[in-house]
Image (spheres, rainbow, N blue to C red):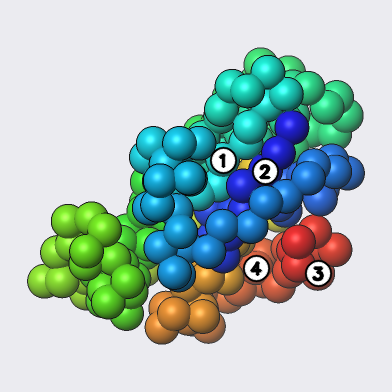
């Protein structure tokens, strides 16, 4: 098995997930800043040219970070980052999807269409005029989440899960590219600092 790694929040999610579960997989670094992921060799691995990717021993490929994490969870028993019951798994998937759609995607595209535009304008359709609105949408949802976290420790309840890993990695990235966490969101800030103390956060 081989994990194709790069900079950015998406690979960070999988690395943090693996660190939490104690999974050790050989890495191959792909320089997305230099556009290596858009060159023939890597497109032969993943025709979409995206990172990360997980190549199995069979040669099959798994892409998309939540799919990679679910595969690693199912093939490496132990822990409850996704859940040990149907109810727990449903809540994890609910909140993982909520974080992805409401914060990660708008803030990520806000970056691609603004600060990241020189890198992405020749790789995908970019809408610079939408950048500020997308960033604002992410902030609106974080304000809503702040109220939710007033009554529980983590997104899916009292247990740390994939949903927390996903949101933490994207907020960490956002803070480095002009989208700092608003200190007025006291409960989100407390959650963010708590997650940041986990050894896996630096994976």
The N terminus appears in which quarter of the rendering?
Answer: top right
Image coordinates for residue 199, horizontal then vertical, percent: 85, 63
- Mark 2 vs mark 3: which is more N-terminal? 2
* Mark number displayed over residue 192: 4
Q: How many marks?
A: 4
Q: Residue furthest front?
A: 40
Residue, disc 1: 53
10 Å crowding of disc 3: few (<14), some (14-19), many (20+): few
The C terminus appears in which quarter of the rendering?
Answer: bottom right
Q: Which SS class for mark 4?
A: helix
Of labels 2 and 4, the one closer to you: 2
Q: Which residue is at the front of the view, 25 or 70?
A: 25
- Mark 2 vs mark 4: which is more N-terminal? 2
Q: Which residue is at the front of the view, 18 or 5?
A: 5
- Mark 1 vs mark 4: which is more N-terminal? 1
Residue, disc 3: 197
The Cα–Cα distance between marks 2 and 3, rounded to whole angstroms, is 25 Å
Above or below — where is 35 with respect to 179?
above
* Mark number displayed over residue 3: 2
Q: Which SS class for mark 3?
A: loop
- Mark 3 vs mark 4: which is more N-terminal? 4
The Cα–Cα distance between marks 2 and 1, rounded to whole angstroms, is 6 Å
């Amino acid at each position: 098995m081989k994990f194709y790694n790069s900079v950015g929040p998406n690979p960070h999610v999988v690395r943090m997930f693996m660190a939490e579960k104690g999974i050790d997989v050989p890495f191959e670094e792909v320089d997305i800043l230099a556009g290596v992921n858009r060159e023939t060799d890597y497109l032969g691995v993943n025709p979409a040219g995206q990172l990360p990717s997980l190549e199995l021993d069979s040669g099959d490929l798994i892409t998309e970070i939540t799919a990679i994490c679910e595969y690693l969870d199912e093939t490496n028993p132990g822990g409850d980052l996704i859940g040990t019951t149907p109810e727990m798994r449903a809540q994890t998937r609910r909140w993982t999807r909520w974080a992805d759609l409401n914060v990660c995607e708008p803030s990520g595209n806000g970056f691609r269409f603004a600060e990241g535009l020189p890198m992405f304008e020749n790789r995908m359709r970019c809408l610079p005029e939408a950048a500020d609105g997308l960033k604002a949408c992410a902030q609106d949802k974080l304000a809503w989440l702040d109220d939710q976290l007033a009554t529980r420790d983590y997104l899916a309840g009292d247990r740390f899960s994939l949903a927390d890993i996903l949101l933490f990695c994207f907020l960490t990235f956002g803070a480095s590219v002009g989208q700092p966490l608003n200190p007025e969101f006291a409960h989100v800030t407390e959650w963010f600092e708590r997650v940041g103390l986990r050894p896996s956060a630096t994976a």
